[in-house]
Amino acid sequence: MTMGEFLFATVAVIAGLFLLFLLLRELFCWYWKINRIVTSLDEISESLSVLAAAQGDVSLDAVAAVACPECGRPIVSDDLSQEDAGENSCPHCGAAFSVA
């Protein structure tokens, strides 16, 4: 076996193991509903932040929520992503909007 063949075989094995890892990861996440759990936990966290701000338990400066104009879901100020044009995008639906 020449050095070129050995290098090719090594790269092929590593690539195959990486693809196997990606496939098995998706299978495990689907089986144990990891993606659904993460989505639910994000929604619970947002709802609790909005409730805490509405009840006055947390100052409104620390937790400010804005309703998305497209999907209507609350967006906590920490989730707002500033783009170069000064607009924000909704982390749920990706709609662009600006906050006054």
Image (cartoon, helix red, strand yellow):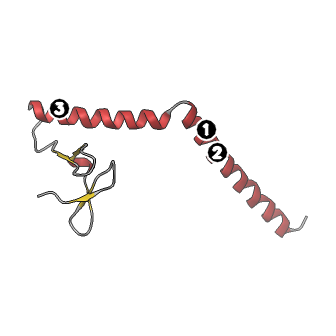
Q: Which residue is mark 3?
A: 51
In percent of width and height, residue 44 lies at 30, 32
Of callouts 3 and 1, which one flags the residue occurring earlier in the amino acid sequence? 1
Q: Which quarter of the rendering shows the C terminus?
A: bottom left
Measure how far apart labels 2 and 3 are at the Cα level: 39 Å
Amino acid tagged 1: Leu
The residue that appears at 29% across and 56% down in the rendered structure is: 95
State the image coordinates of residue 79 (x, y, percent, origin top left).
27, 49
* Residue indicated by mark 2: 23
First in residue order: circle 2 vs circle 3: 2
In the rendered structure, find residue 27 and report the number of the disc placed on it: 1
Residue 80 placement (x, y as % from top left): 25, 53
Check whether the beta carbons of the residues at disc 1 and disc 2 lie within 8 A of each other: yes
Q: Contact, CB < 8 Å: mark 2 with mark 3?
A: no
Element type at mark 1: helix
Q: Tag 3's secondary structure?
A: helix
Disc 3 residue crowd, few under 14, some 14–19, many 20+, Cα 10 Å? some
In the orientation shown, which residue stands out farthest toward the right?
1
Q: At label 3, which amino acid type do we have?
A: Leu
- Residue 46, image quadrant: top left
Picture layout, residue 33 above or below residue 69: above
* Cα distance in 3D space between marks 1 and 2: 6 Å
Q: In the rendering, which numbered label is found on residue 10?
A: none
